[in-house]
Image: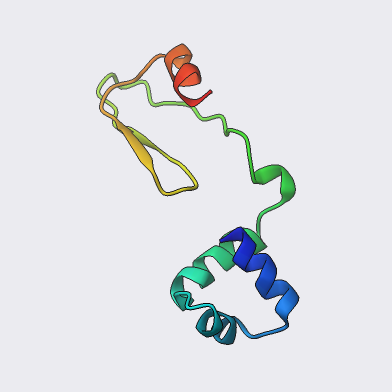
Amino acid sequence: MRSFYQQWQQSGLARKAFCQQHNLSYATFNYWHKRLDGAKPSETGGFTAFNLPSSPSCNFEVIFSSGSRIVFHQEPSAAWLRELLG
């Protein structure tokens, strides 16, 4: 989508016209427009630190930019997460 976004910026076309020309979903393109337009270069990669709740039965998930996600039903160790995501 980043490539389409860059092509659109250079095209001078309205978003809707660009989507029609490239057979893209206008709603999806608008979603990515909001994400990419507000992203600073330092925010486009890497990891974000977060604190987990202290409850032993906490549920949380990791959502990747690709849309894939991992749901945890118990707190994994930090070392295991580093190995998994590294």
Q: In this rendering, is residue 42 above or below 60? A: below
2 sits left or right of 25 in the view: right
Q: Nearer the viewer, residue 23 or 48?
A: 23
Q: In this rendering, is residue 83 above or below 24? A: above
Q: Nearer the viewer, residue 23 or 67?
A: 23
Please provide percent x and percent y for residue 17: 57, 87
Query: How was the colour assigned to the protein in this rendering?
Result: rainbow
Name the residue at the front extreme: 22
Please provide percent x and percent y for residue 76: 36, 18
Please provide percent x and percent y for residue 28: 46, 69
At x 50%, y 66%, the residue is 31
Q: Nearer the viewer, residue 65 or 43?
A: 65
- Count numbered badges in the picture: 0
At x 58%, y 33%, the residue is 47
At x 69%, y 66%, the residue is 6
At x 55%, y 83%, the residue is 21
Q: Nearer the viewer, residue 12 or 51?
A: 12
Q: In this rendering, is residue 24 above or below 78? A: below
Q: Quadrant of the N terminus?
A: bottom right
Q: In this rendering, is residue 40 above or below 20? A: above
59 sits left or right of 2 in the view: left
